[in-house]
Amino acid sequence: MSETALTPIRPGHLAERLADQRNYFASGQTRPLAFRLGQLQALQQAIQRYEPRILAALKQDLGKPAFEAYAAEVGFVLDDIRFTIKHLPEWMAIEEVKTPLVHQPGSSHLIYEPYGLCLIMAPWNYPFQLLVAPLVGALAAGNCAVLKPSELAPATSALMAELIQKTFDPHYISLYEGALDVNQALLAERFDHIFFTGSTRVGKIVMQQAAEHLTPVVLELGGKSPCIVDRGVPLDVTARRIVWGKFMNAGQTCVAPDYVLVPPEMKVDLIQAMKQALKDFYGLEPKASPDYARIVNAAHFERLTALMPAEQVIVGGQTDATQRYIAPTILSPVSWEDPVMQDEIFGPLLPVLTYRSLQEAVEQIRQRPRPLALYLFSENPAHHELVMGGLSFGGGCINDTIVHLATPYLPFGGIGGSGMGAYHGRYSFETFSHRKAIMKRPLKLDLPLRYPPYNGWKEKVLRQVMK
Ligand code: NAD
């Protein structure tokens, strides 16, 4: 246990501590498989030990129900660690690849090499998972890491500082708590890789700062994720799956359906079905439900309540500033020009818009920044192809919401305004690794073909081999 990780940053001191971490990496001890597995197991055991306190911190920060906290945060990460421990030997193995005829005799292979010292910055909405899931990738790939949790989830931030400090050598993994000044101090330093999860606005700042040192970045950002409901789908299950994905964590989920697009003749029935689903999930008084979260802070509460004019509230709309409570709210009618359609909502407000033809819905989405997620409810394979093949977005689901990120077999990440790079499962390991390319040639045989002077026969042979 060390004091370094929790002591506040003093000018000059940070650079020293990061230099210590770089030296630790340079010593090579983070590279062997046994070391990586040992550290992943230490993390796994620490999380298991801290589980009740993690759930309590998430309750304190976000009013997060224990079920959601386990499913989307603690259990999610434990699953990822277990999967990583199981597969790491095969991921780390040197990968043999083919060698072209022109380079024979020879062999080629890839080495997955750790970057070095990685910075991981997390947001507040899944403050445990979004800090620790990237860490799993960083450890698996053999890196050292600096963690920066969000100051807007202070209970989780403080607890994670303790967990990290008690689990890891601070030269290996460190954690810095704090607000903007700490982020800025960290971003001014040179890292070998930066993994940032947060808003598009701050993502741009991170990328600008990283450019100073030509540091590679992964940006896991947000945006407006559409949910298209096609003609002919059963409305009860469609409504349940939309409402579940939207109102989990009170809508503060980066991949929550941001808005729904539905044919005009289905709108009333879909809203009715969603209203029923809300009643089934949270009862007539969601405020009293132990399964419904709260808004993270007063500023976000104010921002969200300004986006729900009374004349558009068709379901919900109740608020309580003292608890930062906003009822699950459905807004209709809504147009593309309304304030609620200008930015990611990131709260429990669900605008319902209409479209006449699917092509029209696709065009509307195409005109806007590329979403992090997109959901299509449809039983028509031609429509699956039109939407999934025709639109660009990070990832998504057909006939469900959110679940595409809860699997280690699919990469999770955005594109364009919703981010770059991806992780989960093997993709996390790859994201935190440099693929070093090696060609190996014997010294015994040295064909003269490539060496000057390039007389006629050499070019003839070259043209035969390379065409
Ligand atoms: P944010 O961008 O405000 O903050 C993220 C991190 O950046 C925090 O650690 C914060 O301390 C730091 N930060 C804030 N301002 C900064 C600045 N000027 N310079 C440097 N660092 C700064 O995001 P947030 O409000 O915590 O989270 C919400 C956003 O995150 C939403 O847009 C959401 O969609 C997105 N998000 C994306 C994912 C994903 O996986 N793609 C997951 C969760 C949240």
Image: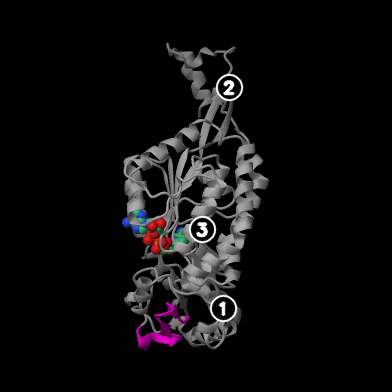
Residue to which mark 1 is pinned = 290
- Could you give the CA–CA distance between mark 2 and mark 3, rounded to whole angstroms? 56 Å
Amino acid type at mark 1: Pro
Residue 159's label in the rendered image is 3
| Residue at horizontal 53 percent and vertical 58 percent from the top | 129
Viewer-closest of 199 and 184: 184
Q: Which residues are magenta?
A: 309-328
Q: Residue 63's spot in the image, x, y percent? A: 50, 72
Amino acid type at mark 2: Gln
Q: Is residue 423 visible?
A: no
Viewer-closest of 325 and 86: 325
- Could you give the CA–CA distance between mark 1 and mark 3, rounded to whole angstroms? 23 Å
Q: Residue 464's spot in the image, x, y percent? A: 53, 24
Rate crowding at label 3 as few (under 14), some (14 to 19) or many (20 or more) other CA atoms within 10 Å: some
Ligand 1's image quarter is: bottom left
Looking at this rendering, what residue extends furthest in the right direction?
86
Amino acid type at mark 3: Leu
- Could you give the CA–CA distance between mark 1 and mark 2, rounded to whole angstroms? 67 Å
Q: Does residue 312 show up magenta in the picture?
A: yes
Asked whether, in this view, residue 311 is left or right of residue 379, the answer is left
Q: Give whichever of discs 2 and 3 has the lower sequence position.
A: 2
| Residue at horizontal 46 percent and vertical 47 percent from the top | 5
